[in-house]
């Protein structure tokens, strides 16, 4: 087979997949209605019917968007290896470094298990403590899964609000920690580490390799979070179909001034990722919860997890962990109150 004959085939397969994605996504509403009301012959407006229709519609919609965005972000991430991230942050002024670190946290691979290696690498490279924390706050809180779910369930305005407020919290909290000069609350052995220049050189990566990285990202990330997506949407469907609106409004509505701090206190001990918590938040909003309270609850669950605190305890003394959690929790509550006031 000649090179010219192989080229169209390489275009036909992605084109067919794209057309299938667009066609399926555009007809999800009709498909959900057909399965719920025609095939199963359930009555529109009935609690179970509405809950089931919610589940059938939301699961494929979220997963389709997740595949698309994770693939794109997987390609973008090939330009931001951890070593390159550290080099970009070295020598930056404090506030500029906080902003860059928070922005890089969005596109850099991160999970709770990588918190300690990243922290050690940043400290070893001479990056200020506050800048490091801006990265550690932004990376788990503002990721492609959260953005995709928010966009698919709430629209681009809410997704933009979440990203903007998440960046604000990451930059502000990191800046405050940096100004407090509390390096003494880092475990001493961290600063005793001796690091030399990296022997690894980043070679040139072909775009086909970056596309391959996108496919791997879809396999690994979507393969890991899809049960959380399904489980979260299932809980959201139950809330959507069965929980009375006035019940949620009385607990998480604007009239309950204590709803924001209580939602943060409840959210901090919980452990979930964006895939599990955001569909639940959507259902809470539909039942009368206010946007600010729901955002505060979601941010506290995603951005302040106990497993991350346990892991970071290896390198941070308890007073610094308390300061870290306290500053971020306060920022989240401020965001909740502001949005309850505006919306």
Image (cartoon, rainbow, N blue to C red):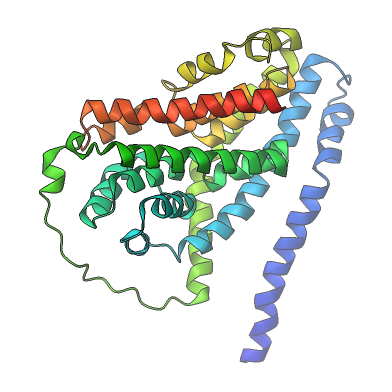
Q: Which quadrant of the figure has residue 136? A: top left
Residue drawn at (43%, 54%), measured in percent from left and top?
96
Reply above or below: 276 against 253. below
Residue drawn at (34%, 33%), measured in percent from left and top?
308
Of residues 97 and 236, the one drawn nearer to the viewer in this rendering: 97
Q: Quadrant of the N terminus?
A: bottom right
Reply above or below: 222 against 180. below
Residue 258, horizontal then vertical, whole percent: 56, 11
Residue 318, horizontal then vertical, whole percent: 23, 26
Residue drawn at (77%, 55%), measured in percent from left and top?
22
Of residues 183 and 19, the one drawn nearer to the viewer in this rendering: 183
Residue drawn at (51%, 53%), measured in percent from left and top?
219
Q: Could one spot residue 283 in this view of the protein?
A: no
Q: Which quadrant of the figure has residue 78? A: bottom left
Q: In this view, does 249 lie to the left or right of 213?
A: right
Reply above or below: 125 against 318. below
Q: Could one spot residue 52 in this view of the protein?
A: yes
Reply above or below: 11 against 341. below
Of residues 336 and 145, the one drawn nearer to the viewer in this rendering: 336
Q: Quadrant of the C terminus?
A: top right
Residue 192, horizontal then vertical, whole percent: 10, 48
Residue 171, horizontal then vertical, whole percent: 45, 43
Q: In this view, does 168 lie to the left or right of 38?
A: left
Q: How many marks?
A: 0
């Amino acid at each position: 087979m000649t090179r010219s004959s192989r080229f169209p085939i390489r275009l036909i397969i992605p084109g067919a997949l794209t057309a299938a994605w667009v066609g399926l996504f555009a007809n999800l509403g009709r498909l959900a209605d057909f399965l719920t009301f025609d095939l199963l012959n359930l009555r529109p407006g009935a609690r179970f019917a509405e809950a089931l229709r919610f589940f059938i519609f939301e699961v494929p919609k979220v997963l389709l968007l997740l595949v698309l965005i994770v693939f794109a972000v997987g390609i973008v991430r090939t330009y931001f290896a951890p070593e390159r991230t550290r080099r970009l942050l070295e020598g930056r002024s404090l506030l500029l470094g906080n902003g860059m670190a928070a922005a890089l946290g969005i596109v850099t691979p991160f999970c709770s298990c990588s918190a300690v290696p990243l922290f050690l690498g940043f400290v070893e490279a001479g990056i200020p403590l506050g800048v490091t924390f801006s990265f550690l706050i932004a990376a788990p809180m503002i990721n492609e899964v959260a953005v995709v779910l928010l966009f698919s369930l709430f629209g681009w305005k809410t997704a933009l609000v979440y990203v903007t407020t998440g960046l604000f919290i990451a930059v502000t909290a990191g800046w405050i920690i940096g100004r407090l000069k509390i390096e003494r609350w880092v475990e001493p052995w961290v600063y005793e580490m001796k690091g030399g220049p990296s022997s690894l050189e980043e070679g040139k990566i072909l775009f086909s390799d970056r596309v391959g990285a996108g496919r791997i990202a879809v396999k690994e990330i979507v393969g890991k979070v899809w049960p959380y997506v399904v489980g979260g949407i299932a809980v959201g469907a139950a809330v959507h179909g069965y929980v009375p609106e006035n019940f949620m409004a009385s607990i998480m509505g604007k009239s309950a001034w204590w709803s924001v701090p209580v939602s943060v206190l409840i959210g901090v001990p919980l452990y979930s990722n964006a895939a599990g918590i955001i569909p639940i938040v959507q259902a809470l909003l539909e039942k009368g919860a206010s946007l600010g309270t729901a955002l505060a609850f979601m941010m506290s669950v995603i951005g302040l997890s106990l497993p991350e605190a346990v892991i970071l305890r290896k390198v941070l003394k308890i007073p610094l962990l308390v300061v870290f959690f306290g500053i971020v929790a306060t920022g989240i509550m401020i965001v909740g109150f502001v949005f309850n006031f505006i919306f």
